[in-house]
Image (cartoon, grey):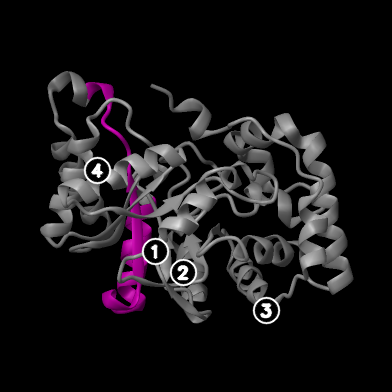
Amino acid sequence: MEKIRLGQSDLMVSRLCLGCMGLGDAGKGPHRWTVGLDESRQILHRALEKGINFFDTAAAYQGGTSEQYVGKILGQLIPRQDVVVATKFLPRSREEIAAGVSGQEHIAQSLDRSLQHLGMDYVDLLILHMWDYHTPLSDIMEGLHRQVQAGKVRAVGISNCFAWQLMKANALAKKEGFTPFVSIQGHYNLLFREEEREMVPLCREEHIALTPYSALAGGRLARPVGQSTERLRLDAYAREKYSPCAAQDAEIIRRVEKIANEKSVSMTQVALRWLLSKTDSPVVGATRPEQVDGMVTALSVHLTEEDSRFLEEAYTPHPLVGVMAENTP
């Protein structure tokens, strides 16, 4: 699989990133649809076979068991230097703030826990899971920079923020000589394109990598309107994000299905091929090995300009949902 440079870092990543939120103990977190260690091993093995070298997890995924599964399995399957592992940390908790834990201390402690879960000495990409409204930005950027200097992190990124926040953080990093954010992991797919207003143009101008999550809208872009799966039934969080606009989104899903039928490919291939044309390395989850096969074949699909216009023209503005709606000052 083709490898590209992640933003202005020295990390070379596959055009697809395997999202590992679905790997983890279903009894240890909010999601009941995640898969266990044996299934996770099959998925990660298939991803490596297909040329994927970029893996995304987070401290918050299933009580840390996603990190544990990813680290244990990759450690058994491939040399550490041959994969790019990203993990994410949350902002300081209310309890930490009350106890006087600084932003830098929080980053150091969070990273050490993640490294312990992963069984690794360093992570390739450490991502701030969402904007931290309650910690001085200088504390965050210096704290991240110190971990890079210590050799525990190779590059840093951010998720779930506004374009002005990303620009403000990197302006501070440039001024103070700190490590800048090289990637943004935002909510972006055919059903939710609000990132195109400011974030996408900013990242193109500043050479910041776009690694969007929810590439298939929690599976909604992978099957015809009305079809259901265990994930669609059990994922209450995704329902909260997509149900309010389901009626207007249905036309887009039908258009994905139409093009898929015309080209004799899957809806997954069409939806991912469109996103690949807009971004660097989309984060795509899987809970079965065959889903990895499906995402990889998207790379060989060709969409014409007319196809893209047909997919895009039915879109209407959406309100903020999920983390971006919930994480407020």
Indicate the position of residue 10 as horizontal and vertical percent values: 30, 71
Magenta span contains residue 90: yes
Amino acid carrying label 2: it is Leu
Which portion, as a residue range, is magenta? 66-95
Query: In the picture shown, does residue 165 fall above or below 185?
Result: above
Image: 134 above or below 236? above
Q: Tell which circle, 1 or 4, labels the residue nearer the N-terminal end.
A: 1
* Residue 303, image quadrant: bottom right
Q: Residues within 10 Å of mark 4 (few under 14, many from 20)?
A: some
SS of the residue at dot 2? helix
Of circles 1 and 4, the one toward us is 4
Q: Which residue is mark 1?
A: 7
Say which quarter of the image contains residue 54: bottom left
Q: Earlier in the sequence, mark 2 or mark 4?
A: 2
For label 4, the residue is 172
- Left or right: where does residue 135 sit relative to residue 290? left
First along the sequence among labels 1 and 3: 1
> Mark on residue 44?
2
